[in-house]
Image (cartoon, helix red, strand yellow):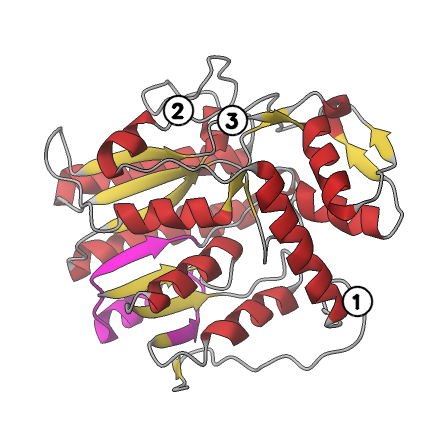
Amino acid sequence: MKVLITGVAGFIGYHLAARLLQEGSKVYGIDNLNSYYDVRLKEARLARLVPHPQFTFRHLDIARRPAMFELFESESFDCVVHLAAQAGVRYSLKNPFAYVDSNLSGFVNLLECCRTSGIGHLVYASSSSVYGANTKAPFSVSDNVDHPVSLYAATKKANELMAHAYSHLYALPTTGLRFFTVYGPWGRPDMAYFKFVQAIEAGKPIDVYNHGHMQRDFTYIDDIVEGIVRLLPRVPTHAGAAPYRIYNIGNHQPVSLIEFIEVIEQALGKRAVKNLLPMQPGDVPATCADVDDLMREVGFKPSTPLTVGIERFVCWYRDYLSAASPVVRTTTTVRPRWPAVAPVEVAG
Protein backbone atom coordinates (compact mmCIF):
# COMPACT_ATOMS: atom_id res chain seq x y z
CA MET A 1 0.00 0.00 0.00
CA LYS A 2 1.23 3.47 -0.89
CA VAL A 3 -0.11 6.13 1.46
CA LEU A 4 0.11 9.90 1.14
CA ILE A 5 0.30 11.64 4.52
CA THR A 6 -0.14 15.40 4.55
CA GLY A 7 1.42 17.14 7.54
CA VAL A 8 3.91 14.29 7.88
CA ALA A 9 6.34 16.39 9.95
CA GLY A 10 3.61 17.10 12.48
CA PHE A 11 3.01 15.25 15.73
CA ILE A 12 0.39 12.75 14.53
CA GLY A 13 1.77 12.60 10.98
CA TYR A 14 5.22 11.56 12.20
CA HIS A 15 3.90 8.78 14.45
CA LEU A 16 1.53 7.48 11.78
CA ALA A 17 4.29 7.43 9.15
CA ALA A 18 6.60 5.52 11.49
CA ARG A 19 3.88 2.95 12.20
CA LEU A 20 2.97 2.42 8.53
CA LEU A 21 6.63 2.10 7.52
CA GLN A 22 7.14 -0.46 10.27
CA GLU A 23 4.25 -2.47 8.83
CA GLY A 24 5.68 -2.41 5.30
CA SER A 25 3.70 0.33 3.61
CA LYS A 26 5.19 2.92 1.30
CA VAL A 27 4.73 6.41 2.72
CA TYR A 28 4.88 9.62 0.73
CA GLY A 29 4.81 12.59 3.07
CA ILE A 30 4.32 16.29 2.42
CA ASP A 31 4.58 19.22 4.81
CA ASN A 32 5.06 22.97 4.47
CA LEU A 33 7.22 23.12 7.64
CA ASN A 34 5.60 26.36 8.75
CA SER A 35 6.77 28.24 11.84
CA TYR A 36 3.62 28.00 13.96
CA TYR A 37 5.93 26.25 16.42
CA ASP A 38 9.68 25.58 16.30
CA VAL A 39 10.47 24.18 12.86
CA ARG A 40 13.47 22.34 14.27
CA LEU A 41 11.19 19.91 16.08
CA LYS A 42 9.45 19.12 12.79
CA GLU A 43 12.83 18.63 11.13
CA ALA A 44 13.95 16.35 13.97
CA ARG A 45 10.89 14.17 13.37
CA LEU A 46 11.60 14.09 9.64
CA ALA A 47 15.22 13.16 10.25
CA ARG A 48 14.00 9.91 11.83
CA LEU A 49 11.79 9.07 8.82
CA VAL A 50 13.91 10.09 5.84
CA PRO A 51 16.49 7.25 6.07
CA HIS A 52 13.76 4.63 5.59
CA PRO A 53 13.87 3.26 2.01
CA GLN A 54 10.06 3.22 1.77
CA PHE A 55 9.68 6.89 2.74
CA THR A 56 9.58 9.88 0.41
CA PHE A 57 9.32 13.47 1.56
CA ARG A 58 8.37 16.58 -0.37
CA HIS A 59 8.31 20.12 0.98
CA LEU A 60 4.88 21.23 -0.17
CA ASP A 61 2.05 23.47 1.02
CA ILE A 62 -1.45 22.07 0.42
CA ALA A 63 -2.64 25.62 -0.29
CA ARG A 64 -0.47 25.68 -3.45
CA ARG A 65 -3.00 24.39 -5.95
CA PRO A 66 -0.78 23.89 -9.03
CA ALA A 67 1.86 22.04 -6.99
CA MET A 68 -0.78 19.80 -5.42
CA PHE A 69 -2.22 18.83 -8.80
CA GLU A 70 1.29 18.22 -10.15
CA LEU A 71 1.96 15.87 -7.21
CA PHE A 72 -1.16 13.79 -7.85
CA GLU A 73 -0.46 13.70 -11.58
CA SER A 74 3.08 12.43 -11.05
CA GLU A 75 2.39 9.99 -8.19
CA SER A 76 -0.16 7.26 -7.60
CA PHE A 77 -1.58 6.71 -4.09
CA ASP A 78 -3.83 3.99 -2.75
CA CYS A 79 -5.17 6.22 -0.01
CA VAL A 80 -4.59 9.60 1.59
CA VAL A 81 -4.39 10.54 5.27
CA HIS A 82 -4.87 14.28 5.56
CA LEU A 83 -3.37 15.67 8.77
CA ALA A 84 -2.01 19.00 7.51
CA ALA A 85 -3.85 21.97 9.00
CA GLN A 86 -3.32 25.21 10.81
CA ALA A 87 -3.73 24.06 14.39
CA GLY A 88 -4.56 25.89 17.60
CA VAL A 89 -7.70 27.46 18.99
CA ARG A 90 -6.24 30.64 20.47
CA TYR A 91 -4.01 31.36 17.47
CA SER A 92 -7.14 31.51 15.31
CA LEU A 93 -8.12 34.65 17.22
CA LYS A 94 -4.89 36.32 16.11
CA ASN A 95 -4.38 35.05 12.58
CA PRO A 96 -7.67 33.88 11.04
CA PHE A 97 -6.39 33.96 7.46
CA ALA A 98 -3.90 31.17 8.16
CA TYR A 99 -6.91 28.94 8.85
CA VAL A 100 -8.66 30.01 5.67
CA ASP A 101 -5.59 29.26 3.56
CA SER A 102 -4.75 25.87 5.02
CA ASN A 103 -7.93 24.45 6.52
CA LEU A 104 -10.36 25.66 3.86
CA SER A 105 -8.55 26.36 0.57
CA GLY A 106 -6.00 23.63 1.22
CA PHE A 107 -8.71 21.10 2.01
CA VAL A 108 -10.61 21.88 -1.19
CA ASN A 109 -7.39 21.46 -3.15
CA LEU A 110 -6.93 18.04 -1.59
CA LEU A 111 -10.52 16.99 -2.28
CA GLU A 112 -10.17 17.96 -5.92
CA CYS A 113 -6.89 16.09 -6.22
CA CYS A 114 -8.43 12.97 -4.66
CA ARG A 115 -11.48 13.22 -6.91
CA THR A 116 -9.57 13.61 -10.17
CA SER A 117 -7.06 10.89 -9.19
CA GLY A 118 -9.65 8.33 -8.12
CA ILE A 119 -8.22 7.92 -4.60
CA GLY A 120 -9.69 4.84 -2.93
CA HIS A 121 -10.04 6.33 0.55
CA LEU A 122 -9.47 9.77 2.06
CA VAL A 123 -9.06 9.79 5.84
CA TYR A 124 -8.83 13.28 7.32
CA ALA A 125 -8.38 14.86 10.73
CA SER A 126 -11.32 16.62 12.25
CA SER A 127 -11.38 17.65 15.91
CA SER A 128 -13.35 17.39 19.13
CA SER A 129 -13.55 21.18 18.93
CA VAL A 130 -16.46 20.82 16.47
CA TYR A 131 -18.71 19.99 19.44
CA GLY A 132 -18.26 23.59 20.57
CA ALA A 133 -21.00 24.73 22.93
CA ASN A 134 -22.53 21.24 23.26
CA THR A 135 -23.31 20.39 26.87
CA LYS A 136 -24.45 16.76 26.45
CA ALA A 137 -21.77 14.25 27.42
CA PRO A 138 -20.25 12.08 26.13
CA PHE A 139 -20.00 13.70 22.70
CA SER A 140 -21.52 11.49 20.01
CA VAL A 141 -20.97 11.70 16.27
CA SER A 142 -24.76 11.91 15.96
CA ASP A 143 -24.88 15.12 18.03
CA ASN A 144 -25.60 18.47 16.41
CA VAL A 145 -22.35 20.42 15.93
CA ASP A 146 -23.67 23.72 14.61
CA HIS A 147 -22.32 25.89 17.43
CA PRO A 148 -18.52 26.20 17.14
CA VAL A 149 -16.85 28.59 19.58
CA SER A 150 -13.67 29.23 17.58
CA LEU A 151 -12.72 29.76 13.95
CA TYR A 152 -10.51 26.68 14.15
CA ALA A 153 -13.54 24.59 15.13
CA ALA A 154 -15.60 26.16 12.36
CA THR A 155 -12.99 25.21 9.75
CA LYS A 156 -12.96 21.62 10.99
CA LYS A 157 -16.73 21.41 10.77
CA ALA A 158 -16.48 22.92 7.28
CA ASN A 159 -14.06 20.13 6.34
CA GLU A 160 -16.64 17.53 7.33
CA LEU A 161 -19.31 19.27 5.24
CA MET A 162 -17.05 19.60 2.20
CA ALA A 163 -16.01 15.96 2.49
CA HIS A 164 -19.66 14.91 2.60
CA ALA A 165 -20.41 16.93 -0.53
CA TYR A 166 -17.57 15.23 -2.43
CA SER A 167 -18.61 11.81 -1.14
CA HIS A 168 -22.17 12.45 -2.29
CA LEU A 169 -21.36 14.06 -5.65
CA TYR A 170 -18.39 11.97 -6.75
CA ALA A 171 -18.60 8.78 -4.64
CA LEU A 172 -15.24 9.68 -3.04
CA PRO A 173 -14.96 7.55 0.12
CA THR A 174 -14.10 9.82 3.05
CA THR A 175 -13.65 9.18 6.76
CA GLY A 176 -13.36 12.06 9.23
CA LEU A 177 -11.72 11.50 12.61
CA ARG A 178 -12.53 13.76 15.54
CA PHE A 179 -9.40 13.64 17.68
CA PHE A 180 -9.61 14.42 21.40
CA THR A 181 -6.63 16.28 22.97
CA VAL A 182 -3.74 14.18 21.70
CA TYR A 183 -0.54 13.98 23.78
CA GLY A 184 2.67 11.98 23.92
CA PRO A 185 6.36 11.90 22.89
CA TRP A 186 7.34 14.19 20.03
CA GLY A 187 4.27 16.29 20.83
CA ARG A 188 3.51 19.90 19.99
CA PRO A 189 5.20 22.61 22.12
CA ASP A 190 2.06 24.78 21.94
CA MET A 191 -0.01 22.17 23.81
CA ALA A 192 -0.66 22.60 27.53
CA TYR A 193 1.06 19.39 28.68
CA PHE A 194 4.28 20.32 26.85
CA LYS A 195 4.24 23.84 28.30
CA PHE A 196 3.50 22.49 31.78
CA VAL A 197 6.40 20.04 31.73
CA GLN A 198 8.77 22.62 30.30
CA ALA A 199 7.82 25.26 32.90
CA ILE A 200 7.77 22.94 35.91
CA GLU A 201 11.18 21.52 34.99
CA ALA A 202 12.52 25.09 34.81
CA GLY A 203 10.89 26.10 38.10
CA LYS A 204 8.58 28.59 36.39
CA PRO A 205 4.85 29.10 37.06
CA ILE A 206 2.25 27.61 34.74
CA ASP A 207 -0.93 29.31 33.48
CA VAL A 208 -4.00 27.29 34.49
CA TYR A 209 -7.13 28.49 32.73
CA ASN A 210 -10.64 28.38 34.18
CA HIS A 211 -8.89 27.93 37.55
CA GLY A 212 -8.22 24.30 36.61
CA HIS A 213 -11.91 23.32 36.47
CA MET A 214 -11.85 22.32 32.78
CA GLN A 215 -12.03 18.65 31.83
CA ARG A 216 -10.35 17.10 28.83
CA ASP A 217 -10.42 13.69 27.20
CA PHE A 218 -6.64 13.31 26.92
CA THR A 219 -5.77 10.66 24.31
CA TYR A 220 -2.35 9.07 23.96
CA ILE A 221 -0.72 9.25 20.53
CA ASP A 222 -0.37 5.47 20.10
CA ASP A 223 -4.14 5.09 20.54
CA ILE A 224 -4.76 7.76 17.90
CA VAL A 225 -2.47 5.99 15.44
CA GLU A 226 -4.04 2.60 16.18
CA GLY A 227 -7.45 4.04 15.37
CA ILE A 228 -6.24 5.49 12.07
CA VAL A 229 -4.49 2.28 11.03
CA ARG A 230 -7.57 0.18 11.75
CA LEU A 231 -9.86 2.53 9.83
CA LEU A 232 -7.62 2.94 6.75
CA PRO A 233 -8.72 -0.33 5.10
CA ARG A 234 -12.34 0.16 6.22
CA VAL A 235 -13.58 2.08 3.20
CA PRO A 236 -17.05 3.62 3.62
CA THR A 237 -19.76 2.35 1.29
CA HIS A 238 -23.06 3.76 0.08
CA ALA A 239 -24.91 2.49 3.15
CA GLY A 240 -26.41 5.96 3.46
CA ALA A 241 -26.52 8.93 1.13
CA ALA A 242 -22.77 8.80 0.50
CA PRO A 243 -19.61 6.75 1.23
CA TYR A 244 -18.90 8.98 4.22
CA ARG A 245 -18.22 8.29 7.91
CA ILE A 246 -17.23 10.20 11.04
CA TYR A 247 -15.63 8.71 14.15
CA ASN A 248 -14.51 9.98 17.53
CA ILE A 249 -11.08 8.87 18.69
CA GLY A 250 -10.77 9.75 22.35
CA ASN A 251 -9.87 8.13 25.65
CA HIS A 252 -13.54 8.46 26.78
CA GLN A 253 -12.32 9.13 30.35
CA PRO A 254 -12.03 12.90 30.84
CA VAL A 255 -9.99 14.27 33.74
CA SER A 256 -9.86 17.73 35.27
CA LEU A 257 -6.97 20.02 34.45
CA ILE A 258 -5.94 20.01 38.11
CA GLU A 259 -5.79 16.20 38.13
CA PHE A 260 -3.83 16.30 34.87
CA ILE A 261 -1.28 18.64 36.44
CA GLU A 262 -0.97 16.35 39.46
CA VAL A 263 -0.09 13.44 37.16
CA ILE A 264 2.60 15.59 35.54
CA GLU A 265 3.94 16.59 38.98
CA GLN A 266 4.21 12.92 39.96
CA ALA A 267 6.05 12.03 36.76
CA LEU A 268 8.48 14.94 37.18
CA GLY A 269 8.89 14.61 40.95
CA LYS A 270 8.32 18.36 41.20
CA ARG A 271 5.46 20.61 42.27
CA ALA A 272 3.97 23.22 39.97
CA VAL A 273 3.53 26.88 40.79
CA LYS A 274 0.05 27.60 39.42
CA ASN A 275 -1.09 30.91 38.00
CA LEU A 276 -4.88 30.52 38.08
CA LEU A 277 -6.64 32.38 35.26
CA PRO A 278 -10.21 32.69 33.92
CA MET A 279 -11.55 30.81 30.89
CA GLN A 280 -10.06 31.95 27.60
CA PRO A 281 -12.07 32.83 24.46
CA GLY A 282 -12.57 29.78 22.25
CA ASP A 283 -12.14 27.26 25.08
CA VAL A 284 -14.84 24.80 26.13
CA PRO A 285 -15.34 23.61 29.74
CA ALA A 286 -15.24 19.86 29.02
CA THR A 287 -14.77 17.22 26.33
CA CYS A 288 -15.67 13.54 26.43
CA ALA A 289 -15.70 11.09 23.51
CA ASP A 290 -18.37 8.52 22.78
CA VAL A 291 -16.37 5.81 20.98
CA ASP A 292 -19.13 3.22 20.56
CA ASP A 293 -19.01 3.50 16.75
CA LEU A 294 -15.24 2.98 16.72
CA MET A 295 -15.54 -0.04 18.98
CA ARG A 296 -18.37 -1.52 16.94
CA GLU A 297 -16.69 -1.00 13.55
CA VAL A 298 -13.07 -1.94 14.26
CA GLY A 299 -13.10 -3.47 17.75
CA PHE A 300 -10.88 -0.81 19.29
CA LYS A 301 -11.11 1.97 21.82
CA PRO A 302 -8.25 4.04 23.29
CA SER A 303 -7.14 2.72 26.66
CA THR A 304 -3.65 4.03 27.55
CA PRO A 305 -3.81 5.29 31.17
CA LEU A 306 -2.92 8.95 31.64
CA THR A 307 -0.19 8.06 34.14
CA VAL A 308 1.49 5.81 31.56
CA GLY A 309 1.23 8.32 28.73
CA ILE A 310 2.56 11.23 30.76
CA GLU A 311 5.44 9.14 32.11
CA ARG A 312 6.43 8.29 28.54
CA PHE A 313 6.24 11.92 27.49
CA VAL A 314 8.37 13.07 30.42
CA CYS A 315 11.00 10.41 29.62
CA TRP A 316 11.08 11.56 26.00
CA TYR A 317 11.25 15.21 27.00
CA ARG A 318 14.19 14.67 29.34
CA ASP A 319 16.03 12.59 26.77
CA TYR A 320 15.46 15.29 24.20
CA LEU A 321 16.66 17.95 26.65
CA SER A 322 19.82 16.01 27.42
CA ALA A 323 20.51 15.79 23.69
CA ALA A 324 20.60 19.60 23.54
CA SER A 325 17.25 19.82 21.78
CA PRO A 326 16.82 22.99 19.70
CA VAL A 327 13.24 23.11 20.99
CA VAL A 328 14.27 23.67 24.58
CA ARG A 329 17.72 25.23 24.14
CA THR A 330 18.86 28.24 22.22
CA THR A 331 21.99 26.85 20.57
CA THR A 332 22.19 27.42 16.84
CA THR A 333 21.61 24.42 14.62
CA VAL A 334 21.95 23.92 10.90
CA ARG A 335 18.62 23.18 9.24
CA PRO A 336 18.39 20.71 6.38
CA ARG A 337 17.49 22.34 3.08
CA TRP A 338 14.41 20.39 2.05
CA PRO A 339 13.68 20.73 -1.66
CA ALA A 340 10.67 22.77 -2.67
CA VAL A 341 9.82 20.73 -5.76
CA ALA A 342 11.72 17.45 -6.20
CA PRO A 343 10.94 14.66 -3.71
CA VAL A 344 13.65 13.31 -1.45
CA GLU A 345 14.13 9.56 -1.53
CA VAL A 346 16.85 8.21 0.74
CA ALA A 347 17.69 4.54 1.07
CA GLY A 348 18.98 3.41 4.44
Q: Please give left or right for residue 30 compared with residue 265 in the image.
A: left
Per the rendering, the mark at residue 172 is none
Helix, strand or loop under label 2: loop
Q: Earlier in the sequence, mark 1 or mark 3?
A: 3
Q: Which residue is mark 3?
A: 253
Q: Measuring 61% from the left and 26% from the top, which residue is drawn there? A: 255
Q: Please state the horizontal and vertical placement of residue 65, each as a whole percent of the image.
A: 36, 62
The residue shown at (24%, 75%) is 74
Q: Nearer the viewer, residue 313 or 65?
A: 313
Number of dots carrying numbers: 3
* Element on which disc 1 rests: loop
In contact (CB < 8 Å): disc 1 and disc 3: no
Q: Amino acid at mark 3?
A: Gln
Q: Is residue 136 above or below residue 115?
A: above
**Quadrant where the C terminus lies?**
bottom left
> Which residue position is annotated with label 1?
329
